[in-house]
Image (cartoon, helix red, strand yellow):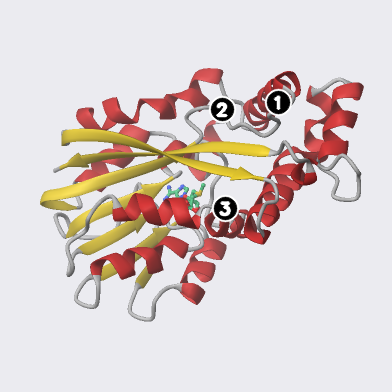
Amino acid sequence: MDKQKNVSGLLGDTKHRDYAPKLSLFNRFAAPELRKAIASLQLEPGAHVLDAGCGTGEALQWLRDAVGDEGTVTGLDLSSAHVAAARAQAPADALVIQADLDRLPLPARCFDLVWSVNTINHLRDPDAGLATLAALLRPGGRLALGQSSLLPDMYFAWDSRLERLTNEAVRQYYRDRYALDERDLTAVRALVGRLRRAGLKDVRARTFIIERVSPVGTDDENYLLEAIFRATWGERLRPYLSDADHAELARLCDPLDPGYALRRSDFHFLQTFTLVVGVA
Ligand SMILES: C[S@@+](CC[C@H](N)C(=O)[O-])C[C@H]1O[C@@H](n2cnc3c(N)ncnc32)[C@H](O)[C@@H]1O
């Protein structure tokens, strides 16, 4: 286990880890709300921005749009596959660096904004990671941490029991897979306290709602079907549900089944995206 700690993050990230397809699906799906979150920052044209844990890099273009031609956008990620995907689609003048947040090759006090979405919860020592990111800000610069699903997602408006069991099964799967305690997975909720402890001022939080009803669009269906129903749930939840519950879940997640969740007239999906911002 100690050896494992040296080579991977809390949720198994290494430079060889690749979940690029899942990240692209999420960013295409949540693009309207993520762009709204960026717009809420009212970035100055000409600002210098870092996306820390940029994944497949969709936000690099959105950040570029916000800071204009005089601004600069830099992406940084640990994973070779994610960096390659980000470089392929980043604006031509964006820099995408492969690096570990724990050992940053960047000078102090050079950014107006550090944007980091769904990444701090992957670090073994989030407070150390935040201190590193805070040190990159010029005085008055902002650290903006985005986090999905601080409240439980709503998938099955018609069946709260199966939804609760499914959400619990997912959490248990992650606890088993990465040998985590429940508190390791919930520690991410304390973003406000973490930013204050990192010495940031004027810390604020705002939650955006991602909401879809049937009939869902193509990007919505691609994300929910591929990234959630198949990649996150699917067969891997079988050990954590009764046979009857797993069979019911499988029917709801099968596009060939007449009861497919996304075609139900009562399909109503809710997910939160919380942005916590502090000033250096
Ligand atoms: C859940 S993904 C989020 C990616 C992107 N921000 C998004 O919202 O789509 C977490 C990202 O953090 C990266 N990551 C994990 N640990 C890291 C570290 N120590 N240094 C840099 N990047 C890291 C992973 O490779 C992954 O791309």
Q: Quadrant of the C terminus?
A: top left
Q: Dot 3 surroundings within 10 Å: few (below 14), some, or many (20 or more)? A: some
Q: Is mark 3 within 8 Å of ligand 1?
A: yes
Disc nearer the start of the sequence (2/3): 3
State the SS at label 2.
Answer: loop
Disc nearer the start of the sequence (1/3): 3
Number of numbered labels in the structure image: 3
The residue pinned by badge 1 equals: 163
State the SS at label 1.
Answer: helix
The residue pinned by badge 2 equals: 152
The residue type indicated by label 3 comes to: Phe
The residue type indicated by label 2 comes to: Pro
Disc nearer the start of the sequence (1/2): 2
Left or right of residue 192, residue 77 in this image? right
State the SS at label 3.
Answer: helix
> Horizontal and vertical percent for residue 43?
21, 58
Q: Which mark is residue 204?
A: none
The residue type indicated by label 1 comes to: Glu
> Horizontal and vertical percent for residue 20?
59, 59
- Rounded to the nearest angstrom, the CA distance separating label 2 from label 3 is 17 Å
* Residue 4, picture quadrant: top right
Do the residues under discs 1 and 2 have CB atoms within 8 angstroms?
A: yes
Q: Dot 2 surroundings within 10 Å: few (below 14), some, or many (20 or more)? A: few
Near-viewer residue (111 or 127): 111
